[in-house]
Amino acid sequence: MVRSRITGLEFAMTPAVYLPSQHASVHNLPDDDEQLRAVLADAVAAAIARQHPDGNFEDPAADEDVGDMSLGVLSLLCLAWHRGDRRDAELVGAARRGLDFVLSERVFRTDNPGELFHRVRHSGLPYARYVLGAGEHPFGDWPSTVWAMLHAVNVLELGRGLFTDARYTELAEVATGFWRWLTEASVFNPQQTANQAIGAVVAGLALGRLLADTSIVDESMALYHSEVRSKRITDRGLRLPVEHGAGHDQNYLPISLTFLARAHQVSGEQCFLDDGDEIARHLECRLSARGFDFGGPRYSEQHSGCEGMLGLRFFSGRIRADLGRYLGDRRGAYYCATTPGVASGHFAFTTVWFWQDDHEWYRDTTGEPVHTRYSLRHGRVSVSLTGQLTPYLVDAASTAVIESVVDHQHGIGPLVRYPDGKTLLLTRPLGPVRVRDTTGGGLGAKLVTKAVVTRDQVMLAVQQLYVSDGERLYVAAVLDRAALPADVELTFLAGLPYATAEGERQRRIRTVAEPGGVPFDLGRPGEVLTTKGVLLSDGFAISAGAALRVVNPPDGLAYVNSTQTVELTQEQVAFALGDDPRGYGNPDAGWQRVVATNHVLAEPVSDTPHGRVVFALCYGPDATPMPVSVAEAEQGVLIGTPAFTALVGHPAGDAHGEPVLRVTAVDVLSPWRTSGRRPGR
């Protein structure tokens, strides 16, 4: 039995579902020299103990990403040697046997059967295989060769004096051959995955510098400009490298940051800093207060581990944003591991770079609200907005609320239901969107004003206000009732409570309840829960200025949560509906095929000025009803809550068309602040 932290009721808990790779903020991972030295020592000792008699360092549990694995582990031994941590005979012998094995068994020179992206057949140039067997997934050989080249450069840089001159020279020749295979024998970047392409550029820059070969350096820079930089796409006003046909990817974008940081360290070129700044600013506006996010063309909610650490730390200081809040994958915290505790070698180059880097995490200690055009973050609370300035992610009380879906429409906002049963979510803008940000009295606020078009082709102004005191997020919406037919139903679609922190894991939310009520199963098709205005889920609450109800969707794979999807993560649902459910489709495209999610619906505030409709909600840790007052003011609408009063100006704005917003903190402490209750703290 489990006892709810708010209701105190005991009930049988349904089996928990956890997000597999979003754990804890990466800046909370110890990165002092003593800790890193101990981690490296353990990894090296474990690798040597498990080394096969023939010198192989590969983890037998791995069935892919194998071709570069042994060379990656070898680079970790070279790091320990270079730092002077170990220079004993055991390490020297293991490293030499490891290099012998790589050069004799893991450098392939005959074309892999089934590879369709060669520019030169039977070139004889060396490459690394993604899967060792001939003809098994040759599509992965290009990135595996990039990875192997990056490992090889690290071994060459860190292993001077560790190997015989003959073997050292042979590895340098193989590394040069890798570069020629990547750029001459194969189509460059056949997977159209920018992080891999940037990785290849880094490998070329590093090898060219090491060998004093300016031709490789020049070719690397030319490829970066022609194959990466010129093909970037724009999202939320920022240019991003293309990953599988789209810009943002939860896993790959932090990895691209790491590659760009390293590219600048190797070359000194300003373009890598400029491009990394744009990615970093994009992450800053997407990531919630706790570092949660979702969405991507390949990995829609899989966060990286060691791969993104260098880039996130490096660019957090450059743009002065707390990117270290990113929820990383603790299974690969310092190095990738197929078997827990055993370094696989994959992405070992990022481990090496992180150990050698002396940047520190930027942490915002001001306590002030952080505004971007597409987000508001304050303390433990945040709201993130799409490129159309529609909220898709609210984070409060260690809980993520993601966008709802109704009749294929995604977002959080006012919902119109017509008499024929069809709906319209009033979030898609017609033309430019106006934004006004304010800060003061311990509050941060953002007002978004949109022109939207109704089904009857009437243009309607919709204003959504977000106010945070650092512990909770208030959301209010104001619209003109007269612009809508008299027979439509108006509610506010408040988002889908999705995942909550449980230690260093994120657990899917399966049940909700009203205060004093029994758990309501989100996975029971068609069920409805009606509350008086407060909805609970563990230590999280949604409070409204009017009644709240939850409506469960019908059964079926295209509905979240249904009996078919309640035990799946957002990414798993998206892949199941994607073009290729096996993992090579676009989960973002699959997510757009969701018909409906559970609907948390708030009724309008009852006492409002004539002709207006106002909704008001609060997301936070407090199981307390939220009284709201609304009054007509000379310049617009005055909204009062226990924490603040806000003047939401007329949608037309001031004399220059700019939105009018004034927010004043309430002097008297609110019931939340005097109750002393902090559920889940």
Image (tube, rainbow, N blue to C red):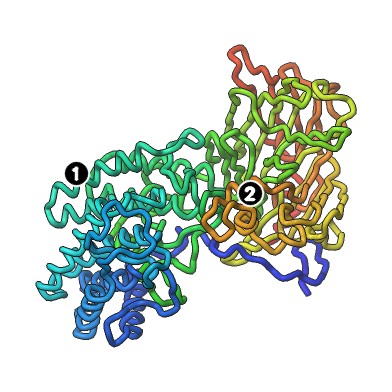
Report the disc number at residue 424.
none
Q: Amino acid at mark 1?
A: Asp
Looking at the picture, tell me which residue is in the foreground, 632 or 149.
Answer: 149
| Extreme residue toward the top, this view | 655
Q: Secondary structure at mark 2?
A: helix
- Left or right, 467 with reference to 63: right
Residue at 69% over, 26% down: 452
Looking at the picture, tell me which residue is in the foreground, 586 or 669.
Answer: 586
Report the disc number at residue 591.
2
**Which percent across, then down, holds residue 196?**
36, 53
Q: For mark 2, does the 10 Å Cα neighbourhood hold few (<14), some (14 to 19), or many (20 or more) residues?
A: many
User: Do we see residue 14 in this rendering?
Assistant: yes
Q: Is residue 431 above or below residue 78?
A: above
State the image quarter where residue 67 is shown.
Answer: bottom left
**Which percent across, then down, holds residue 496?**
71, 50
- Left or right, 84 with reference to 616: left
Looking at the picture, tell me which residue is in the foreground, 421 or 19.
Answer: 421
The residue to which callout 1 is attached is 218
State the image quarter where residue 218 is shown.
Answer: top left
Q: CA distance from mark 2 to mark 1?
A: 41 Å
Residue at 64% over, 48% down: 471
Q: Is residue 306 above or below residue 393?
A: below
Q: Secondary structure at mark 1?
A: helix
| Extreme residue toward the left, this view | 165
User: Do we see residue 294 in this rendering?
Assistant: no
Q: Amino acid at mark 2?
A: Trp
Residue at 38% over, 47% down: 315
**Which percent across, then down, holds residue 377?**
57, 43
